[in-house]
Amino acid sequence: MSTEDLAWAFPEVEPGVEPLGGRVLVQLKRVKKKMTKSGIILAEETRDTEKWANMVAKVLAIGPLAYRNRDTMAPWPEGSWVKIGDFIRVPKWGGDRWEVAVPGEDPLEDKALFMMLNDHEVISRVTGDPLAMAEYV
């Protein structure tokens, strides 16, 4: 996993929100550009499908009630499932998703993708290369 590729897939962009309650804010992996490395041009429909079906994300922020008993504020017995900076898998459908233009890049292309989801909806922690995971529709 190259640092350059990781920085492109998860650019530093202000999402414009912070999580409340038991929610987790993540940045979804950006999708390939219009053309693959082998020179195949991807149709816009393919890019859109891949973008919104994306399931790999980086944890940016965790709400104050996340991974806590909502009545007592005591941490869950197993503790927090994730921490800021972890790469995780998120549900293909659900959550609140939005895009933000990346400063210095064409605002019509390659936007940063964000998602807000409930703490219990995190599927897994990615222990390998987050860029090597492919999603299937």
Image (cartoon, rainbow, N blue to C red):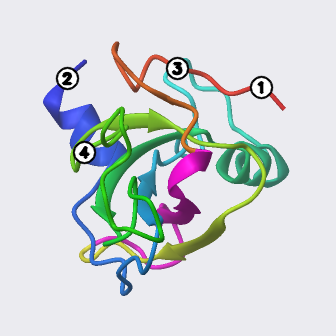
The residue at which mark 1 appears reads as 136
Question: Would residue 22 be found to the left or right of residue 36 on screen?
Answer: left
Pick the residue in front: 16 or 38: 16
Farthest-out residue, left: 3
Is 64 rendered above or below residue 136? below
Labels 4 and 1: the sequence-earlier one = 4
Is 81 rendered above or below residue 98? above
Question: Would residue 38 be found to the left or right of residue 71 on screen?
Answer: right
Q: What element carries label 4?
A: loop
Labels 3 and 2: the sequence-earlier one = 2
Q: Give the range drawn in magenta.
A: 105-121
The spot of residue 90 in percent (x, y) is 58, 42
Residue 132 located within the stretch drawn in magenta: no
- Mark in front: 2 vs 4: 4
Q: Which amino acid does label 4 sit on?
A: Lys
Q: What residue type is labelled 1?
A: Tyr
Q: Are marks 3 and 2 in contact (CB under 8 Å)?
A: no
- Mark in front: 4 vs 1: 4
Q: Please name the residue shown 50% across and 54% down the image.
A: 119
Few, some or many residues within 10 Å of mark 2 (<14, 14–19, 20+) = few
Q: Is mark 1 on a helix, strand or loop?
A: loop
Distance between mark 3 and mark 2 Cα atoms: 14 Å
Q: Are marks 4 and 1 in contact (CB under 8 Å)?
A: no
